[in-house]
């Protein structure tokens, strides 16, 4: 018979082996993110940007070949959510688009990659074609170091050429790992661990989870967002986070996909179906049939100049909540949350006196497996959690959920 102490030692050993073998050092970690509207190319056609991104996101699922060639997403170069990320030692800071719809992290579109003693040239060619741009180059392993965030041996694409990324240096991709498949030209079956995957495998965070906080803004540039790796920031939401499993429906299942239904007031405009949650889409896009119902329920007209729906002040006064039903939870967008910030109307080429709606059409009818995109205008009203470890997405209300800001 074992002495009690020895049994206890054995048990403790077994427990410590069963537990994560790496010590969690600093969890969670937060990174500020800034929203930027770039109007220097003239007025922004947000609808066109969002709809072409939606088409590219849908297309990837329909054809595995596209995935092989890395055609994965459109990046919106007019409205971006940017993180300043240090790479190398000493670090060079790159302004990277935070994208939940793609998963490669790369630099070099603007500021050239600066090699330091921490750079390791892998010689591996990498290429990604986004709907409105592309980059190709090779991967380096390097250290990412930014305000409490340290990732060693991160595979980083270094662009030799890129198109469609004016004003930014590249992307920090926080989509699912599988979206990196097909991007290494010589090893199409190999995936590239994302920054979140590496933070986890290096013991920096305890779970492969990213929490995102956005807040409504009425200015062109505003650092009012926050990315949290490894958990959530309880100061950014009210109440509890409710989770829903990732959808199994294709092609939404390639991304941060969930099932939801949408009601306007008490009228169902979109029966339960699959779609995605996406930081790279500004508007809320819904299937054409749901869009028609929303338009007639609100009485809105299509504005020729912006492409957005427009309502009168009387119609605004009559607007009802737009409810996103996810599992047993309902996330209500108030009337004020359904309109574009009036202070930013002219950036869209619109009139300062009009009221534009942020809900628009995804361009295809429901039943195609990616029937809605809950974009930034949804995410600025609800905290969101992207949880790979538990295959789920979470939402919580915030102090901005019902705020009158627009
Ligand atoms: C804005 O976009 C234009 C192209 O439309 C580009 O030339 C410029 O560099 C961008 N500026 C910023 C600050 O992103
Ligand atoms: C989502 O909806 C699809 C289609 O109705 C269904 O098959 C699936 O079980 C639902 N739930 C999840 C988590 O995918
Ligand atoms: C806007 O659309 C309406 C209806 O299609 C049309 O009559 C009008 O001429 C258009 N206005 C402009 C400025 O294109």
Image (tube, helix red, strand yellow):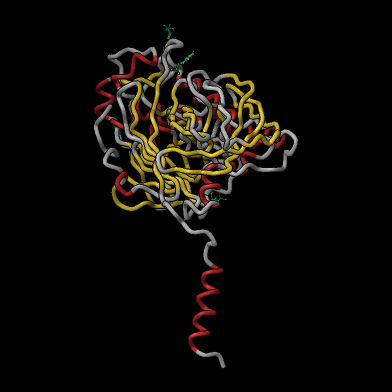
Q: Tell me the residue at 24%/27% (across/down).
A: 317
Q: Which residue is found at the position 29% from the left and 48% from the top?
A: 238
Q: Quick check: can you spot residue 257?
A: no
Q: Is residue 245 above or below residue 155?
A: below
Q: Residue furthest right?
A: 186
Q: Is residue 128 above or below residue 44?
A: below
**In the rendering, at what x and y percent does residue 275 appear?**
51, 40
Q: What is the x, y in percent for residue 303?
A: 40, 15
- Return the residue nearer the eye: 238 or 287: 238
Q: Is residue 137 visible?
A: yes
Between 54 and 82, the one nearer to me in the picture: 82
Left or right of residue 138: residue 374: left
**Quadrant in the rendering for residue 139:** top right
Quadrant for the C terminus in the image: top left
Horizontally, is 95 left or right of 255 in the view? left
Quarter of the image where the N terminus is located: bottom right
Q: Residue furthest front?
A: 117
Q: Position of residue 129 (x, y in %)?
A: 63, 27
Left or right: residue 53 versus residue 178 is left
Q: How far across and down, in percent of the image, does residue 206 sit?
A: 47, 55
Which residue is painted at 46% across and 44% down in the image?
Answer: 260
Number of marks drawn? 0
399 left or right, relative to 126: left
Q: Quadrant of residue 336?
A: top left
Pick the front one: 405 or 295: 405
Query: In the rendered image, which quarter is residue 122 located in?
Result: top right
């Amino acid at each position: 018979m074992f002495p009690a102490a020895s049994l206890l030692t054995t048990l403790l050993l077994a427990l410590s082996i069963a537990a994560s073998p790496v010590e969690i050092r600093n969890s969670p970690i937060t990174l500020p993110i800034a929203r930027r509207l770039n109007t220097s190319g003239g007025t922004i056609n947000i609808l066109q940007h969002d709809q072409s991104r939606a088409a590219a996101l849908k297309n990837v699922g329909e054809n595995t070949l596209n995935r092989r060639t890395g055609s994965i997403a459109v990046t919106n170069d007019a409205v971006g959510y940017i993180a300043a990320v240090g790479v190398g030692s000493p670090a060079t800071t790159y302004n990277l688009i935070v994208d939940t719809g793609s998963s490669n992290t790369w630099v070099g579109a603007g500021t050239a990659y600066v090699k330091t003693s921490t750079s390791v040239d892998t010689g591996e060619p990498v290429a990604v074609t986004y709907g409105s741009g592309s980059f190709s180059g090779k991967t380096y392993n390097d250290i990412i170091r930014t305000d409490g965030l340290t990732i060693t041996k991160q595979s980083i694409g270094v662009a030799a050429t890129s198109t469609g990324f004016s004003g930014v240096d590249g992307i920090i991709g926080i989509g699912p790992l599988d979206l990196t498949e097909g991007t290494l030209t010589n090893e199409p079956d190999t995936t590239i661990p994302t920054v979140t995957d590496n933070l986890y495998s290096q013991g920096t965070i305890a779970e492969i989870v990213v929490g995102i906080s956005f807040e409504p803004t009425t200015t062109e540039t505003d650092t009012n967002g926050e990315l949290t790796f490894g958990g959530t920031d309880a100061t950014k939401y009210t109440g509890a986070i409710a989770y829903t499993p990732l959808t199994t429906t294709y092609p939404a299942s390639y991304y941060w996909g969930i099932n939801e239904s949408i009601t306007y007031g008490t009228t169902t405009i979109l029966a339960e179906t699959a779609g995605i949650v996406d930081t790279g889409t500004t508007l809320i896009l819904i299937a054409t049939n749901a869009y028609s119902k929303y338009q007639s329920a609100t009485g809105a007209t299509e504005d020729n100049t912006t492409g957005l729906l427009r309502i009168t002040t009387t119609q605004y006064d009559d607007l009802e909540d737009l409810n996103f039903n996810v599992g047993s939870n309902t996330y209500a967008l108030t009337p004020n949350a359904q309109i574009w910030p009036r202070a930013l109307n002219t950036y869209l080429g619109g009139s300062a006196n009009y009221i534009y709606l942020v809900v628009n059409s995804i361009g295809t009818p429901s039943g195609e497996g990616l029937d809605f995109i809950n974009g930034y205008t949804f995410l600025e009203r609800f905290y969101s959690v992207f949880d790979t470890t538990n295959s789920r997405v979470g939402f919580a209300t915030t102090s901005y959920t019902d705020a009158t800001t627009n």
